[in-house]
Image (tube, helix red, strand yellow):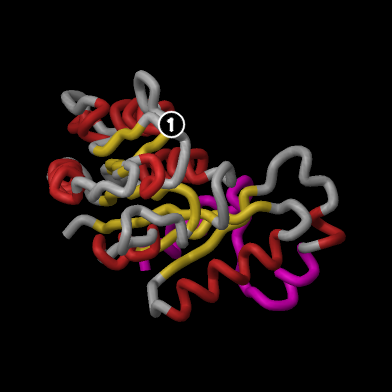
Amino acid sequence: MTKRIFVTATNTDIGKTYATLKLIETFTALGYRVGAVKPIETGVQSLPADGERLLQAIQRYNPLTKELCIDDVVPVQMPLPAAPFVASKGNPVDYAAIDAAIARMECLCDICIIEGAGGLLVPVDATTDMIDMIERFNAKTLLVSHCRLGCINDTRLSLSLLKNRRLSYEWVLNCRDDDHGFSSTSQPWFDAHFDPWFRLDQDVEALCRRLLL
């Protein structure tokens, strides 16, 4: 059975697509065939930018995906750069198209990475938040957080949501070049409360192995 991993984040522009690309590369190096689906992408004016990067990556590393097109990776596309509920003007999301895209992808891979939109409480439609989609897909969660001031609070809030919903998860910090204060302002708390914890730029292989458990 294909392993499903749902990539979410503490907010938008935290690094979900970057993390997904790192997972594709690393799982491939570990000997797995990898696929990726971004069920919903908003802010699409011509082609979905994040979805294009995912399509190029899986086609580079997994020859079985060579015939796929962008609609196979991003089945639901919306022009307004907003939460799906807002971008769709409150209309129902085409879950049948999403389910079909995931089913097609899973025929071609051992691991299917599903990239969400925004954070866990982003509204998808009138009755569904992004966290509900994790349950719908029965996927293991990877929460991506940041290393700026405030990352402790943001990470703890999202982890609390995942724990309260009894969802299986791992989490990782995406530290960027300009996050200079992290080691003194935030890292001591993570060191004191988590063993291990992962940085995307240093521990991606160890993270991938944990995601397979």
Residue 72 seen from this side: yes
Location of residue 91 with respect to 143 vertically, above or below: above
Quadrant assignment, res 69: top left
Q: Which element is circle 1 on? A: loop
> In x, y percent, where is residue 75?
23, 37
Mark 1: few/some/many CA within 10 Å (<14, 14-19, 20+): some
**Res. 185 image quadrant:** bottom right
**Location of residue 29 by image quarter:** top left
Q: Reply above or below: 38 against 65.
A: below
Q: Residue furthest front?
A: 89
Q: Residue at x 39, y 49 (%)?
A: 116
Please state if 148 lies on the left or on the right of 128 as rendered: right
Instruction: Look at the picture and state if 157 lies above or below 108.
Output: below
Residue 25 placement (x, y as % from top left): 42, 39
What residue is pinned by disc 1? Answer: 43
Closer to us: 114 or 89: 89
Identity of the residue drawn at 50% across and 59% down: 143
Q: Which residues are magenta?
A: 187-213
Q: Amino acid at mark 1?
A: Gly
- Expressed as whole percent of the image width and height from the top left, the position of residue 12 reads 55, 46
Task: Specify whether residue 207 is painted magenta.
Answer: yes
Residue lying at 80% horizontally and 68% vertically, measured from the top left: 188
